Image (cartoon, helix red, strand yellow):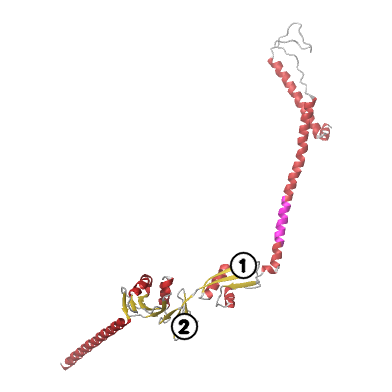
Amino acid sequence: MSNDHEENLTPWKKTNDDYLKRIEDEQKQAEEQIEAEAQIEVVAGGVDKDGDPILRNHKPRVQHEIPQKQVMEEQEVEYESFSEALPKLKKQKNKVMVRRLILIVSVAFVFILGLLYIISPFSKLNTVEVTGAGELKTEDILKASGLKKGQPLFPQVLSLNKFAEKVEKSNPRIKKAEVKFHLMNMCTINIERYKVLAYEEVNKSYHPVLENGVLLEDETVKKVDKKYLIFENFNGDKRDMEALVKGYNQLDVTLRNKIKKATSTPTKANPQLVTFDMKDGNKVIISIQEIKEKFPYYPQVAKSMKAKGYVDMEVGIYSYSYATWERLQEEEKERQKEAAEKKARLEEEKKKEVDEDETSTENE
């Protein structure tokens, strides 16, 4: 029955009963301590007003009364603490539930958006634009890229570099290709092309030579603008043309603009010899591999020349007028002719000696 009664008590009543019981226990402990410490010595016939025997070091009985106001305040504080705890717990629990709800709704919302995007036209490639193509055909670039309109966009976005590499390999004129996606389902292919540096003359037709030295044999034009350099007699030798273009590109722009034509003029001693026709009327003879080192001296040599002519940079640097050069060439031809005739005579005499020796041997 007592247990049922305790269960029916309000929290405030339970707190009050516990407090009164604690005060009563403290009062009993204080009295027991006083009696244990005191020396019990009764004075004859002496009792105090409370009827207790008068002892040595006797102190009158003290009533530990607790003010009712203090009891009520402490009970009210404990009651208020308990009453305030419950709403805080409920509030904290509500916050946790709200966070979980927001998380669930967010995930569901993102999932729904993704599903709507997949089934919408925006998830498929719609438009492909090509910029910087110049003389190249847009259709050929689109075909080479491998991009497919109307197909899912996301897998193609993951292969941007692959598409760019395909475009770069599709045409030697393409220096660099960049593929970019933008505006939901649109794509742009940006093309950077090699510039045409020169034209090689072959049978009164001209083939473009790019700035990297590549000869476009499949492309032919009949007339060439005067601003372009002309290559002659290279016979499609890619190695020599690439070396020539490399050396040419290392020259100062002002000096490059003075060159009109480059003709391959190989000799037995130097198969990479080339002759440049200058716009000022002079000609420069130089080895391809020495263009970077020697050609920059041309303006200084040209100023010192009294007449138009040749600047020979094959071995050292020398200048000759055309008349002097022609005379030297004729003399060189005569020397070569005499050397060839002498060699032929020696071979003929040697052959006769061999024949005579064979004849005498047979007679013996």
Q: Where is the N terminus found, in terms of image quarters?
A: top right
Q: How many marks?
A: 2
Residue type highlighted by circle 1: Phe
Mark 1 or mark 2: which is in front? 2
Q: Which of 208 and 217 is in front in this view?
A: 208
Q: Is residue 55 left or right of residue 341?
A: right
The kind of secondary structure element at disc 2 is strand
Q: Which of 236 and 56 is in front in this view?
A: 236
Q: Is residue 108 magenta?
A: yes
Q: In which quarter of the image is residue 359?
A: bottom left
- From the top left corner, tell me how far across and down residue 321 is, in percent: 32, 80
Q: In this view, does 208 lie to the left or right of 281?
A: right
The kind of secondary structure element at disc 1 is strand
What numbered label is drawn on residue 206? 2
Residue type highlighted by circle 2: Tyr
Q: Separation of disc 1 and disc 2 at Cα?
A: 39 Å
What numbered label is drawn on residue 181? 1
Q: From where the camera sits, is residue 147 visible?
A: no
